[in-house]
Structure formats: C-alpha cells, structure tokens
Amino acid sequence: MMCPTERHPDLPSDFDDLFRRATGSNAYGWQRALAREPRPPSVVAVPTGSGKTAALILAWLFQTLVEGRGPRRLVYALPMRTLVEQTADVALGARNRLGLTPEELPIHILMGGAPQSDWRERPERPQILLGTIDMLLSRALNRGYAESRFQWPVAFGLLNADCRWVLDEVQLMGPARATTAQLDGLRHKVGAALPCQTTWVSATVDREALVTVDRPELGPVLTLPPSDRDGPLAPRLEAVKRVARLDFSSIPQAARPKALAEAVLDQHTVGTRTLVVFNTVARARATAQALRRAAAKVDQAPSIVLLHSRFRPVERAARMTEALAEPEGKSGTIVVATQVVEAGVDMSSRTLVTELAPFSSVVQRLGRCNRAGEFEVADVLWADPGALGEGDAARKSAAPYPPADLDATRQALLDLEGQSLSPTALGGLDVPESREEAAVLRRRDLLDLFDTSPDLSGLDVDVAPFIRDDDERDVSVFFREVEDLAARRLENEPRPESDELVRVPLAELSKDRSCWRLDHVEGVWLRTPYREIPPGAEVLLAAGQGGYSEMEGWNPGAKSLVPVTPRRAAAPLDGFGRDRLTEALPCEISAHLHDVAEECHALAAALVLSDRWRQVLHAAGALHDVGKAHPVFQRTLLRTIDEPDAADRLWAKGGAGGGRHERPYFRHELASALALEAIDGQFAMPEARVLISYLVAAHHGKVRLSIRPAPDEEPPPGAGPGVRFALGIVDGDRIPAVSTPLGELPAVELDLSPMELGGDASWTDRAVGLRDQSALGPFRLAFLEALLRVADWRASARERQTGA
C-alpha cells in the first residue's frame, strides 16, 4: 500500500478531463487504461507516436495528486540526455496547462553537474525526477555518477522508496534492463522503506530480458486495444514508408562518407526534412562534413545539421532547435544524427536514410519517418554494406552491434524491398537479435555497494557493468583554462556546472591529454592517468588541448582552443577533511539540536512512518551534533564569533573565516556517535541504541560502516605512543555536558575501541548487522539516513534565514 498523499483540490477529478486540459487532446483508450489500473503494468508496449510520455506522466500525476494513491516520486529514466530534455518539456508543459506551480509539482532534471539538493530536500512531497539512466541508476546503486561520494547514501535511500520508476526506451539501455529488474525484485525480497513500482516502456521491448533470478515473473503488459488501432491512431499506424536499398557493398570504408553524402543529396526532396541515422558519432561526423562540402557546390543547398549525444547542453539545444525547425524555403534540411533520434524525439522526415542496425533499432528509426502519416508516401533508404559474416573485421565494421544482428536485419530488409514499413506491417515481423550476457546484480552485490567508505587504494565497487556496455562507458568532461599541463593538483577550480559538461566515451581519453579528477579525500583536482579514471567520473580537461567544437561537439581529433563556458557560481568542493563551518550565522548546539529534532518529527509525520521509526529519527536528530561540543570544534568556531560570552557557550555553527580544524580530518559526527557509545544507550531508546548511534555517525556520509584514520592521517600533537586515533579523535578525548531536547547529555570520555574489528563492541560488525537485519536491511537503513540528513539540511537552511 502506498502512503497517502494530499489530494489537489483544483485538478479535474476525471482522468479524461485532466488529460484534455494538460495536452489539448483526448486520451486514447490505452492511456485511459494506464491511469485507471490499481497498479501500473510492468510493461507498456505501444508503437511510437502513441503518446507514451504524456500518458506515463499524467497517469502518475492523476493517481498521486487527484486520487491520493500513487508514490510521491515519479522517476523517469531515459537512455540519452536529448530525450530527457524533451520529456522535461512535456512535463513542464502539462504542469503549466494544469495551473500547478513549481512548488506544488517540482520537476527536477538529474544530469551531470546539475545541482542535486533540491529534489532530495522535500521527500514528503510529490515530484518528478527526470534523468539519464546512468545518472539515475548509479544513484539507486549507491554510486551516483558525477556526485560526491558523501551524498550517495541520500539518493540511494530516497530512490529505493516511495517511487514509481519509468524506464522509457528500455531497448537502448543495455545491462540496465536486467539491473532495474533485479532492483525491483530485491526491493521486494530485502524490503523497502516505502513501496516502489517499476514500469518498462518501449515499442520493441525485449520482455525476456526483464525476467531475472530475483524477479522471475514478467507481470502485466499493456498494449493498444482494438479501439485505438482502428480509431484516431490509424493514420499513424498505416503511414506508408516505402523501403529501398542503397548498395555500398563495393565501396571501401574510407570512401563511404563521400558516397553516402552524394546519395543523400540526390534523394533529398527540396522543402522537406531528410534524416540520416548512423550507429557511431565518428561516422555521423564524417558524413556531415562530406555533406557540407558537397552541398556547398549546389544551388539552394539544404541546411546540414549534425546531432549526437556528445554536445554540451547549450550547443546541443541549438543543434536540436535547428533539426526540429520547419524546413526553410525550397531547400529543406538534412539532419545527420546518431541513435539520439531513435526514440522519444518528436521529429518526422519525408526521407529516412539509415545504416544497418539491429531490427529493433531500425523500427525505432522508422518512427521518425512520416510519423503522423503527413505524407502520402515517404521513402526509407538503407545503406547496404554487404553481408558481414564473422571474424574481427566483421565485428569492427558492425560495432557497436553484433554482426549477426546486422546480417539478420539485412536479410529482412532485402525481403521487404519495395514494401511499406508502416507500424502495422512491422507488428507482424519477427527478426532475431542476440542478447548479450549482462552482469547480474545480486543481493551480495547490493550489500557490497551499501558501503561507501573510500577504499585505501582509491577504488570502489564498479557499477558500470550493471549500467552500460563496455563500449558505452562514459565520463563527464569539462574544459577549463589550465596554464600548467603537468600540474599535479588544481586547488582553486570549483566543480562544474551542468552547462559545462559533455558526456564522452572513456575510451576516447588518451595519454596525450592531461586529465584531472576530483579527489574526495583532499577536495582538490588531481592529475590522473586516463587509464585510472572510472566510468561516470567528472574529468577536468585543458581547453588549450582542444577536443571540442560548438558545431561538431566532442571530437578527440580537434586541436583548436575550446571555448570555455562562463561559470555563474562556484560549487564548493567536498573533501573528507572539509567541514562546512561558515554557511550559517552563529547558532548554539542546543538550539540546532532542537531544530533538527523538530524537522525529523515533521518529516516522519508527513511520511506516515511507524511510531518506532518516528521515535528513532527524533532521537537521532536530538543527539546528532553533540560531538560539536568537542574542544577542537569549539576552538574553530570561536575564531568566528564576536560575542562577549562566546567562550561560555557551546556552538553548532559560527560565522565566516574560521578556516580548518587544528586536527586535520576532524569529524564531529564521529565524536557524537562515540559520546552516545560512552553512555551505553541509557539516554534514549536503549533498545535502538545501535541504530541511533549509526544514524548519528552517518549524517554527513563520511562515517558509516567503519571507523578508521583518513589516508595519510597522523596522530594529533600530544597523542601518546600507540594510542588509538581516527578522523581527528583520540582515545580519551573529553566532551562536556550538552543540553539536548531529550535532557542533558553528561560529560563523557571518548573511547575508540569500537574501531577495532571483531568482538561485541566492533563498530563495523554492529553496522553490518543493521544492514543485514531482516526488519531493517540496506534500503530501509539508507532511507532513515537520508531523512536525518534532510532534516539537518532543512534546519540549517532555516537557521541561516533567521539567524537563530
């Protein structure tokens, strides 16, 4: 059962009325069925052009805001950024036409470099999250790409509870198909804090790939009813798309861009749009260059637009605008693209030219030709390279697809020569495709991923095999002006903004290029050999070394200076030893503990959590910062507070300019947890003392399953020989009495013996016990972590505004 959500009084109570107001069109029968089902189907399998995006968004919105029965978060995942942006346009348009405000229905886009705090700060309110599959799924696996490791558990906790996951265009998601199915199954087996739902969507979904070891049944499948096929969708389903072959089998690879450019210009119908689709960015780029050279020699040359996924957001939006614009004058437009147009892009062409691809991909590309039946006849031309066969040469030529799949498509298209490939005709075809053996996420992998501690070797459990194929593993690169290309450290460069980032293949970084990667321990950019950069990382590149142009996007062979995107704000770096001490006005510990406990109570009530969880969260909020009474923390803050009796009070927050702690890597939350350990749970809820201590320690994401010194941490001055120390805490440190909402916590002496492995006092053993507890488990534990951190953020924000 879903947690009830507050119904919106100004929305139509009937789905047909809501759909009409949101879109200006009447709902199809399948869209109406989607909204009225008690639970969403596992699979939505309807043809392209059937209104999937609007239906999936509005069905959730109707169930959540009108009927009060849906999960609070709609998590809408897509394979490419271009599709995310177009889906965002649909969601924003629907919100505006329904008269909802951004406060009533927040819509957040999760892509590399975009701020992530907003969506996490209101988990009790309905909201829409849109993002690429790698950004969303990596967060659901506790390894958020382009996100600070210390923020990973928050997204992990929230994205595995109270969500409806929609995996759209799943045929393009590779290993993510099986991973999302396994996650869905594991949430049911291990237990989620609040129920999650998952729906996979595609006109060509591979249903067998969604049946996995921990999710052995497919579940309900929603398809078009006869009333839709024979009714308003009929013109789309019967649109004529006449197929013909372009024979390139005798043309060498190096000469094909020029030959294809000439063929495309010859087949292009003036005043219309021609779409040319390639399997790789390199071939698309080479053919676009050849087209521009050839078009320059003809009168009334069509506009040439190159469109692929390797652009920065601003340039990508400009190219997409050019591609979608109505063809100008008599010349028209030729759009040269990659798989970015295969799905979700509301583009139609009079002529479609495509490389061989797996037949499911060809079907998706056909959805961009004569999309609404606007032409009496449209042409589909396929470039025939000849039979590929087997061997290394065949694999290289067919990449990124298996040669056998392309040969199967080739034979099917040869058999269909001269026929129409309308959606109705395609529905009766069955062309075999191979299925790559993907890495399977198992329970043991999930438990391993729960631990976010920095590995001493600098390595983490790699989630890339669960998300992308080997040849699709990307990094987010951005360009900055760097004078010294050999510099080991770049300390004054803030994290990138979303407008700076471009996703590029990890394999296209090289030894000839200087690369810097964020070091999460020191909070600086460290020069890193390209072979040591993991998938999903943010990588700083020197603008002077080239690699990008505004018209062609990422091009590793480009040598000209890359224009650097102006930065609007400096996003702070987050390192293991950094404490954000100067973001609030002075605030005493007792007041801050009261504020956070109050926020915990409000959050738990809004989410209708059990009484036990409410009490645990309230206690953790009331005690989470008692460790700030430690003399090291107080001396740092007192440097920033100019009040006569400042030294006689205990402070949680100070003013500006305090600098770093005198003990490097000092973590006040470890001091808080050890203070609670010292009183052995005799302060609040003794039966939950291990859970409360864990939540208190974990509320910055830096102390979770283990207690150990930071890399290169030395014993603080004055520490005796052989004494235990970790994260700026030394055995025997004392904390004075602290006033809390639960009463006065007595003065205590800190004992670091829990950092030792083994035995009843072992911190690691007890934390792992919480993770593996059947009544708790990794999803519920992370959810509680997330709620405490959200309460802390919200209380701190209020204190900054009020000066409390």
Image: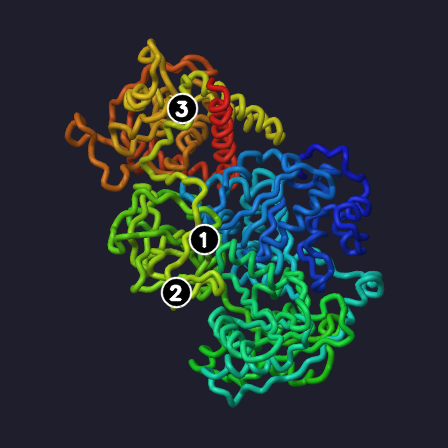
Pointer 2 or 3: first along the chain = 2
Assess disc 2: are there few (<14), some (14-19) or many (≥20) residues with their C-alpha within 10 Å of its C-alpha. some
At a point 57% along the width and 34% down the height, the residue shown is 122
Relative placement, left or right, of 614 versus 647 is right
In the figure, residue 70 lies in which quadrant?
top right
Assess disc 3: are there few (<14), some (14-19) or many (≥20) residues with their C-alpha within 10 Å of its C-alpha. many
The amino acid on which the numbered mark 1 sits, given as a three-letter code, is: Leu
At a point 57% along the width and 83% down the height, the residue shown is 384
Q: Nearer the viewer, mark 2 or mark 3?
A: 2
In the figure, residue 693 lies in which quadrant?
top left
Where disc 2 sits, the SS reads: helix
Q: Nearer the viewer, residue 58 or 325?
A: 325
Q: Nearer the viewer, residue 415 or 431?
A: 415
Pointer 1 or 3: first along the chain = 1
Locate the N terminus and report the quarter of the image it occupies.
top right
Residue 546: x and y in percent read 37, 62
Residue 19: x and y in percent read 77, 48
Where disc 3 sits, the SS reads: loop
Q: CA distance from mark 2 to mark 3?
A: 45 Å
Q: Which residue is mark 1?
A: 501
Asked if 458 appears above or below 306 in the picture, the reply is above
Q: Nearer the viewer, mark 2 or mark 1?
A: 1
